[in-house]
């Protein structure tokens, strides 16, 4: 589990691709999600019909969103496969639905297909270190859900993916203390965001 957490942190801080064993699962491509396409996604932009790319609200020129069809499917999904897989946007490369399994955040209402896949993930939690990490991840997610009102407005994202990623980012604070003060947590989040995490381009809805 620790290796996976380290990989997620590298992914969210450096936009490193996530190594997710999807095994043909396309639940996230069929879950009515807006895909953020950034100025760094030139290759993806070159492979997505321009009619499918819309300016991303509130973001500078060059940021787009790729929407979904009436079934909630990404328009680049053809015959249940990504038709631009080698050229897909970074949002797709970094998406890892295991963030929900690790944090215990339930997305059954928002993303039932993803939730069904999430229920199948199993982490290796053998050994005290792995169990401590697992407990800290769930404690961080619980804290962000229950104490969001004690943190500065806007600190805790409404979007469950962003909230799960934030919980993973700060879970280390919950290894030794299940209930750090809101002030301490707020300062840590601000510092980590200043270091790169938490940009609006992390996820436009995936
Ligand atoms: S671009 Fe490809 S990987 Fe990304 S959501 Fe669409 S079909 Fe899925």
Image (tube, grey):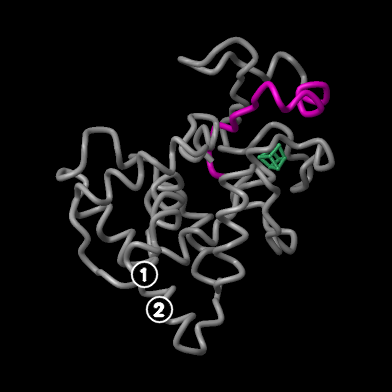
Asked if residue 33 is among those painted magenta in the image, a careful observer would answer yes
Task: Give the residue drawn at x 74%, y 15%.
Answer: 50
- Asked whether 127 or 158 is in front, the reply is 127
- Which residue is outermost to the top? 61
Res 143 quadrant in image: bottom left
Location of residue 193 in the rendering, given as x and y in whole percent from the top left corner: 43, 38
Contact between labelled residues 2 and 1, with CB atoms less than 8 Å apart: yes
Badge 2 local density, few (<14 within 10 Å), some, or many (20+)?
some
Task: Give the residue drawn at x 34%, y 47%.
Answer: 188
- Residue 136's tag is 1
Above or below: residue 58 compared with residue 200? above
Q: Is residue 14 left or right of residue 183?
A: right
- Badge 2 marks a residue whose secondary structure is helix
Q: Is residue 142 left or right of residue 193?
A: left
- The residue where tag 2 is placed is 132
Location of residue 20 in the rendering, given as x and y in whole percent from the top left corner: 68, 60
CA gap, disc 1 and disc 2: 6 Å
Q: Is residue 17 left or right of residue 169?
A: right
Location of residue 161 in the rendering, given as x and y in whole percent from the top left corner: 46, 47
Which region of the structure is painted magenta? 31-48
Quadrant of the rendering where the N terminus is positioned: bottom right
Indicate the quadrant of ligand 1 in the picture: top right
- Badge 1 marks a residue whose secondary structure is helix
The answer to whether mark 1 is within 8 Å of ligand 1 is no
């Amino acid at each position: 589990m620790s290796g996976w957490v380290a990989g997620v942190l590298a992914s969210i801080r450096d936009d490193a691709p996530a190594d997710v064993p999807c095994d043909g699962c396309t639940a996230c491509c069929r879950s009515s999600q807006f895909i953020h396409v950034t100025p760094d996604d030139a290759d993806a932009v070159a492979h997505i019909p321009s009619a499918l790319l819309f300016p991303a609200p509130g973001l500078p020129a060059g940021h787009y969103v790729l929407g979904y069809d009436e079934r909630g499917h990404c328009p680049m999904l053809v015959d249940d496969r990504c038709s631009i897989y080698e050229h897909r946007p970074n949002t797709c490369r970094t998406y890892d639905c295991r963030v929900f399994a690790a944090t215990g955040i339930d997305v059954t209402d928002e993303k039932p297909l993803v939730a069904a896949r999430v229920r199948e993930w199993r982490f290796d939690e053998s050994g005290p270190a792995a169990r401590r990490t697992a407990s800290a991840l769930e404690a961080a997610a619980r804290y962000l859900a229950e104490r969001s009102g004690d943190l500065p407005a806007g600190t805790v994202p409404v979007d469950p993916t962003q909230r799960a990623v934030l919980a993973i980012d700060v879970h280390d604070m919950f290894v030794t203390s299940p209930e750090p003060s809101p002030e301490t947590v707020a300062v840590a989040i601000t510092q980590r965001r200043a270091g790169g995490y938490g940009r609006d381009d992390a996820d436009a809805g995936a």
